[in-house]
Amino acid sequence: MAAPRVASLAAAEVEVWCREEKSSTARKTVWNQVRGLFKEGASEPALLWWLREEGRILGRLLLAREDKGLRVGLLRLPWEGAWSGSLRRLVEAVEAEARRRGVSFLRLPQEALDRLPPALEHRLKELGFLEEPGVCHWHLRRTALAGKAEGSLPEGAELDGDEGRWAPGQLDAATLEAGLSALAAHGALDLWLEWPHAHQILAPPAHWTLVEERRPRSWRLDFPPTNTTTPPA
């Protein structure tokens, strides 16, 4: 029996790759995701991979470009079976391609996985992945009228109509209260807030309710440059 083979896709294979999703809804979602990344220039067929053995598709991987790195947009493996070797083969192939492209890291966000098997963290550690600092995502909704706008929006915030996004570099209770007051005064009703260091315990101040909270995890594999120079004698 031939060993499983990892390969990136040709353009004509992308639709077949997407059809491997389990439901029609999932297939449509992934197809739209892939087309969107292609349109943005964030990905290409060569950044989609599959692992095949005698015609069977054992695993699939979607990558997107980040500044100086690559991000996993989707990872599908047979988590009920012997997925560990499949993961290793995919990571090794991606590392070789990443080094060829001069890419310095690979990021794997939890959101790219359809499940989180118990042994995954241990296997990722064996492959050299390190867990990144946490990020917290809040969807907030204003519940009271606000005063007249004074001053500018907080740094890292933008407003489109009554919907806002705010990504401060760091956050504490005083900064949160001041920032939300400013956003409310500028008309924000719904706000998507993202900040690092998810171990912090913060609560929404008065006049805002927490609609949804997510604390997804993420792992990173660095590809240090290969030193090809000969050290001095």
Image (cartoon, helix red, strand yellow):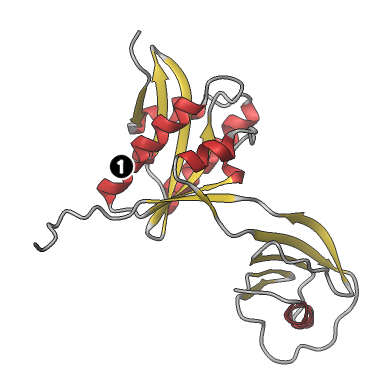
Direction from residue 31 to residue 44 in the image, left or right: left
Residue most extreme to the bottom: 150
Quadrant placement of the C terminus: bottom left
Residue under label 1, please give it: 97
Q: Residue 126: percent from the left, percent from the top? A: 47, 39
Q: Relative to 175, say whether 87 is above or below.
A: above
Quadrant location, the N terminus: top left
Q: Is residue 37 left or right of residue 4?
A: right
Q: Amino acid at mark 1?
A: Glu
Residue drawn at x 70%, y 71% is 161
Q: Quadrant of residue 119?
A: top right
- Above or below, 55 against 186 in this view is above
Position in image of residue 37 (x %, y %) = 46, 48
Task: Report the side of 178 relative to 93 (left or right).
Answer: right
SS of the residue at dot 1?
helix
> Which one is in front, 132 or 49?
132
Task: Please rate how many residues cluster around mark 1, counting C-alpha atoms within 10 Å: few if below 14, some from 14 to 19, many from 20.
Answer: some
Q: Which residue shows up at 69% across the image and 60% down it?
A: 136
Total number of numbered discs in the rendering: 1
Which residue is drawn at the image coordinates 62% and 26% (left, top)? Answer: 24
Q: Residue furthest left?
A: 233
Q: Position of residue 176 (x, y in %)?
A: 75, 77
Residue 28 in picture, x, y percent from top left? 58, 33
Q: Is residue 202 above or below residue 66?
A: below
Q: Nearer the viewer, residue 205 or 12?
A: 205
Name which residue lies at 78% across and 66% down. 201
Residue placed most toward the observer, 203 or 11:
203
Q: Quadrant of residue 63?
A: top left
